[in-house]
Amino acid sequence: MKKVFSFSTAAGLAFILALTADSSTLQAWDRGTVAYDNGYQAVIEPVFPADSTHLLAAVPQGPAIPLRIINNSGRDIDRAFFYAGVTDFQGNGIQDIERRIELSAGKQTVVELTLDKLAGNPGFYDVRVLVFDHGRELAYDEFTFGYDVNNLPVNIDPPGDFDRFWQATKDSLKAIPLAVTMKRDSLRSTEMVDVYRVSYASLHRVRVHGWYTVPRWKSGPHAALLFLPGYSTGRISPRIERSRQGFTTLSIQVRGYGVDQQEYPPDNRSYMTIGVRAPETYVYREIICHCLRGIDFLELRPEVDLRRICAIGGSQGGGLSLLAGGFDDRVKFIVANVPFLTDFPLSMTVTGNPFRELVRYIERHPEQTEQVFRTVSYFDALNVAARIEVPTLISAGLWDRTCPAPSVYKMFLALGSADKKIGIYPYLDHGEVGRPHGKVVNQWLLERLRPGRPSR
């Protein structure tokens, strides 16, 4: 059963300021304090259930994780020193375990980590394990796991004028003619797929550029994929391979630049803090409008089946897909891979960019702290999660510190959809999840949107 608590901006702010002001409060891991010869003589392997997600159910005494230690040194080792340290995603030390163990040559020893400090504390945790032979590092391993994650507290507290702000924004957007331009690209088009360069007008009459692809090998109406880009994306490629599968696709460059410029200005690489002093001027107000205009474009296309429009993207594109689905019920399916733009207060306490750009901004402008937190709350996908009732597929990497698993999983819990799925990848970082998860996405799209034939 999901628990929902109100988020206190002041409490979250105090934690972030403490985090950035005094790094000595974090548990340091100093490899220089031990002898290290870059040649491990033993192997440490955590033993998790067969589903390989590293997600453990709640137990009254806290989780217990067996560790398999294999001694490959060729000799028995008496009284080897074993150490395990558990931290949360902010680096705070949760529990330390120390003991002496016997390691027989060529055999495995099982050491059970009983993590009683986690009892009653659902969350995601990092574990670092070392084994020493009289001061010499014999083995090392690190891994991440989730404990009782379905009971993570989900903090949802949108600003009081959230709906009014977004209705006013959409009204302003609606007043601007879409003014579509569309030109077939003969070099990229094939016998199976037509490729078009397109553009349309968005908020402040900014021209948004993109690629539009349409299957030629079958008649419509087609399922449509709105591809939304990652952070700092420059060139956007036409999704020809998806139209070969039977999808119509629209891929857009959300910063208002051309899809294949030779060079892009600096604000296309790093824009997280542009206009952050107020929601009306924040860069993501424009970006989200560019995405909503993409749905306007698809709605006007006669070859698009309006019952099968899917917003899809990874990282920033994943967060934008969720926001588009939360703000516009014309989105009927969502695929959000390692989504960005969710749970800003929590994500800003983790080390990854681009959230850290906001933290550094606060460090330089502490007098604007309250303004910054107020602004980003209008663009936090968590605040629209309950409105998303369409089929949704999400992914998370447990080693991801750009879009950290606690934030992504809270988003998953908060979704209003009864048809939702999340893929968990225990040993993968932000940029690594896409490869294995891509197969899951492909199968999900084919099963749900049925691109090979029109819907009935």
Image (cartoon, grey):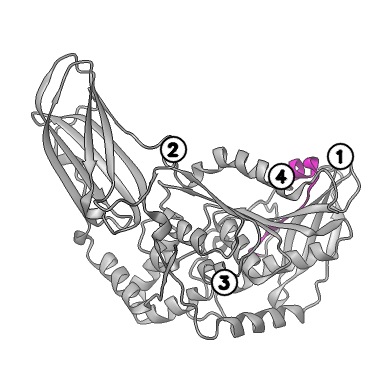
Q: Would you call the spot at circle 1 few (<14 residues within 10 Å), some (14-19), or many (20 or more)?
A: some
Answer with left or right where residue 316 lies relative to residue 373.
right
Which tag, 3 or 1, sits closer to the chain's start?
Answer: 1
| Label 4, label 3: how far apart the Cα atoms are | 36 Å
| Label 3, label 1: how far apart the Cα atoms are | 38 Å
Q: Where are the magenta residues, as a range?
A: 239-255
Which residue position is annotated with label 1?
192
Query: In the image shown, does 122 or 451 lie closer to the viewer?
Result: 122
| Label 3, label 2: how far apart the Cα atoms are | 39 Å
Secondary element under disc 4, as helix, strand or loop, is helix
Q: Amino acid at mark 1?
A: Met
Q: Do the numbered discs 4 and 1 sit on residues whose CB atoms are within 8 Å? A: no
Quadrant of the drawing holding the N terminus: bottom left
Q: Is residue 228 visible?
A: no
Which residue position is annotated with label 3?
283
Q: Amino acid at mark 2?
A: Ser
